[in-house]
Amino acid sequence: MDDFVLKNARIATMADNGAPYGLIDNGAVAIRDGRIAWVGASDAIPADHAGLETEELHGRLVTPALIDCHTHIVAGGNRANEFEMRLNGASYEKVARAGGGIVSTVKATRAEGEDELLAAALPRVDQLIGEGVCVIEVKSGYGLDLETELRMLRVARRIADARDIRIRTSFLGAHAIPPEYRHRADAYIDEVCIPALEQAAAEGLADAVDGFCESIAFSPQQIARVFDAARRLGLPVKLHAEQLTNQGGAKLAASYGALSVDHLEYVGEDGVTAMKESGSVAVMLPGAFYTLRERQLPPIDLFRKHGVPMAVATDCNPGSSPLSSLLTAMNMACTLFRMTPEEVLAGATRIAAQALGLPDAGMIKPGLRADLAVWNVESPAELAYRIAFNPLQRRIMATKSSKET
Ligand code: DI6
Ligand code: FE
């Protein structure tokens, strides 16, 4: 990437400068070697950057590039047929008997090769890129056998070769109990999940370890065994917790210093204070809340009261959140969860970076990567305000060579 300056922009730095959104009106940003070299007022560009190629932005809004910190974007098949069955009155049991639910995605994912899985994921990735996203977290968890879990992670890595995007992977072997281990969750953890995790770590395929702690998935004790393995391997953890019931997953994840705890509709105040102590981010996933027509709201006021940072992500997956628009997730987080436009923009930039353990992204600040989004809007609140409208003018991403750090 060439060195250049953007000027006469409204810059929502999302860094702490005392103003809402870290806003700099009539601002400029200097980019050198794929990093932010300087940011400030357009009439105060330092002499050492003044000679660079300069682009006039005519008051457009510039934000950090967006970050989708929770997706299952690699998955086989889709579940439109069961969506249709349910809307035609089929019961949950009937859908399950017809092979529906998460197991159907496991079956489809096992049946697809790397190229097929990649080809299916790329249009969803492209939609996110088209909304100014520069980092996508991608989970495994629809393989539930060693071979397919690793295949999913390889496909996730290949997304970064096929597109100008940074990918962070999470091993999610403890997502569901596969049919062949029905009623034998402990055996699944020992015989499949932990060996697959060890293999993924040995091959450098996992940046973090995730799990689904729920009555229909894994208990806190079972998740703890997966997290012990993660700790031995030196990998950070995160957890789907308290999505449908309160199992104490948030407290467990916090005790392992989790980067994030995700969903959290049913978390209690004890879970929230544990997350505050561990510095874990609360990842809000309104796409799943919407799709499942959930009624229990995540306790936004408790996160605010205890100073637990909130991220917002798509949870893009074929079952509970067939959503590949982060802007829509931001809108939903405002309308459904009553988060503020500033909270949701922070949640899709600075706090999302924190949820992924990325200290070099999510803000417009000297030294950080020059991953930016330029928008055809005047105020940052417009990003979350419109429904299914994409005002991206262009995305700027730090050079390919500095893509992985
Ligand atoms: N929570 C969810 O909402 C998804 N996974 C999870 O742990 C559901 C995934 C699916 O239905 O395919
Ligand atoms: Fe999820």
Image: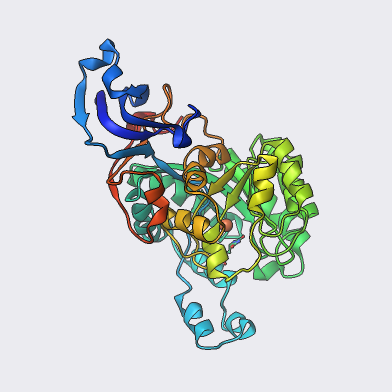
| Residue located farthest toward the top when viewing the structure as drawn | 47
Q: Is residue 26 above or below residue 102?
A: above
Residue 138, how many percent across, how many down? 50, 50
Q: Residue at x 76, y 65 (%)?
A: 184
Quadrant of the rendered structure where residue 247 is?
bottom right
The colour scheme used here is rainbow
Q: Residue at x 27, y 20 (%)?
A: 43
Quadrant of the rendered structure where residue 7 is?
top left
Q: Residue at x 25, y 30 (%)?
A: 8
Q: Is residue 103 visible?
A: yes
Identify which residue, 111 or 223, lies in the foreground.
Answer: 223
Identify which residue, 157 or 41, lies in the foreground.
Answer: 41
Q: Is residue 112 above or below residue 330?
A: below
| Picture quarter with ligand 2 | bottom right
The quadrant of the picture occupied by the N terminus is: top left
Residue 208, how many percent across, how many down? 59, 42
Residue 224, how many percent across, how many down? 76, 48
Q: Residue at x 66, y 34 (%)?
A: 234
Q: Is residue 81 above or below residue 108?
A: below
Q: Is residue 204 found left or right of 131 in the rendered image?
A: right
